[in-house]
Image (spheres, rainbow, N blue to C red):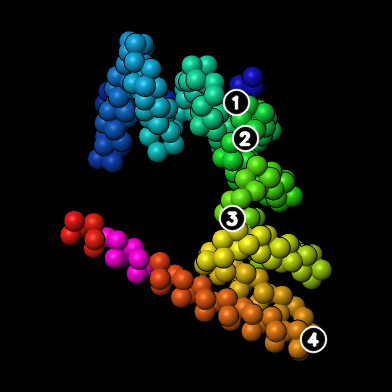
Amino acid sequence: RPAVFSGPPQTSTKKGVGLSTNTRVALQQLLLFAGAVENYRLASERIVDNPDMQRLSMEYMVAMYGPDKLNNPGAAEPIIRRMIELTPDEVANHFALARLYEDAGQAEEAESILRRVVDLQPGDPSVYLQLAAFFNRQEMFEETIIALRDRARIEPDNPEAYYTLATYFWEKAFRDFRLNEEEQAGYVAEGIVAVDQALELKDDYHEAMTYKNILLRMQANATTNKAAQDALIAEADDLRTRAGELRLEQQERAVAAAAASSSG
């Protein structure tokens, strides 16, 4: 595998060097983190008869090497690979390894790992969502949509799968200023198709109604036909009103349920 990680920068320990308060605090934190890592390492090596505790110790150890602590991805990599060896079917470990490579600028290796996870767990929706999120961060829109469609393919009765597709089409049409009018109109239309599929499965899906309302207004803004524009805006207005009503009903039910729970 590619050697892409290096250890953290070395800190001078020579005596007589004047240190600021912030530097001393930072060094103390590093010492605490290093001590925690050692404790987790010992736990992961010695608690072999308790796989759950061993796994937890390794997860904590990886977290200690994160960017907000010791910031040493090179040390985290072999631990994550060991976790994968111990529980190869646990997709979260593969995701963590892929993100490690992505953050190190090794996008091809990260993609390769994620595609292997898809082969490992083709029936798990989360693997397609992770792949889609990766492609989205890499600004690879068509690949993002393919991954999201694959997710919808294995969850054909899940309205959220189609709703998610619609949100990505909206974001592309709304935020990508490189698109020409025809391209933007195409993405808006695909977003409406996706959100309609979500509403067919769940007709009180107020989040989906909100997005359809926005997409219809984008369609209305793009048309020069006054009658068609008025019809699109009227439909969007109805959806916005209905979405607000459903949202309020949901909030009222949540408040009532909380009150019943506290009184019971």
Q: What residue type is labelled 1?
A: Val
Q: Earlier in the sequence, mark 1 or mark 4?
A: 1
Contact check, label 2 and label 1, Cβ < 8 Å: no
The residue shown at (26%, 37%) is 25
Spatial CA span between label 4 and label 2: 45 Å
Query: Which numbered disc covers residue 159?
Result: 3
Residue that carries the numbered disc 2 in the rendered image? 123
Circle 1 or circle 4, nearest the eye: 4
Circle 2 or circle 1, nearest the eye: 2
Residue 104 visible? The answer is: no
The magenta span reads 251-258
Q: In the rendered image, which quarter is residue 123 located in?
A: top right
Of all residues, the one furthest to the left in this rendering is 263
In the image, residue 254 sits, relative to residue 4, either above or below, namely below
Residue situated in front as seen by the camera: 264 or 79: 264
Q: Residues within 10 Å of mark 3 (few under 14, many from 20)?
A: many
Quadrant containing the N terminus in the rendered view: top right
In the rendered image, residue 185, in percent from the top left (x then y), is placed at 76, 69
Spatial CA span between label 2 and label 1: 31 Å
Spatial CA span between label 1 and label 4: 56 Å
Q: Which amino acid does label 2 sit on?
A: Gly
